[in-house]
Amino acid sequence: MKVDRIHLVLGLLWLITGMALGEHMGRTQDHGQMPTHSHIMLVGGVLPVLWAILNRDWKMGSGLLAWAQLGLHHAGAAIMIVALYKLYGGGDIVTLGPALGVSAVLVILATVLMLFLAVRARPAAT
């Protein structure tokens, strides 16, 4: 499977997960996981779908940097979302803070890699 397809599939799976959490919060009237829901939707879902579109339309390729960007983003998103879920479920910030910090750095690095890939890419002919 290509990098763009993996981003798309994982992003859509995260969006479904975020929607399910949003539905659960609405049904139970317990909105304590709203920050987690927001991060699932944006970091887990919207960004990978955007990365998929950019990868495909700008022909960013499937070299080592593209695979590194994919891995960093999705590892960071998964760590972040699990840590946020635990935190807003009553977890301790002292325990979860380091995981949140590492996950944020991973997502930022993935975005920097995407910027690098975008700068060096050429758009597809229309």
Image (cartoon, grey):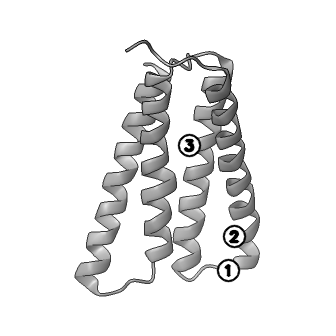
Mark 1 lies on residue? 92
How far apart marks 3 and 2 lie (CA) works out to 18 Å
Identity of the amino acid at label 1? Asp
Image position of 76 (left or right of 11): right
Quickly name the residue at label 2. 96
Label 1 residue SS: loop
Q: Residue 27, percent across and down?
A: 23, 80
Q: Secondary structure at mark 3?
A: helix
Q: Residue at x 56, y 20 (%)?
A: 60
| Amino acid type, label 3 | His
Task: Tell which circle, 3 or 2, labels the residue nearer the N-terminal end.
Answer: 3
Task: Single out the residue that lies furthest toward the left.
Answer: 27
- In the rendered image of this protein, does residue 38 appear above or below residue 31? above
Contact between labelled residues 1 and 2, with CB atoms less than 8 Å apart: yes
Q: How many marks?
A: 3
Say which residue appears at 37% left-offset and 15% top-offset.
Answer: 126
Marks 3 and 1, the one that precedes in the sequence:
3
Q: Are marks 3 and 1 in contact (CB under 8 Å)?
A: no
Label 1 neighbour load within 10 Å: few <14, some 14-19, many 20+: few
Question: Is 2 rendered above or below residue 111?
Answer: above
Label 3 CA crowd tier, 10 Å (few <14, some 14–19, many 20+): many
- The residue that mark 3 highlights is 74
Residue 33, placed above or below residue 76? below
Q: Amino acid at mark 2?
A: Leu
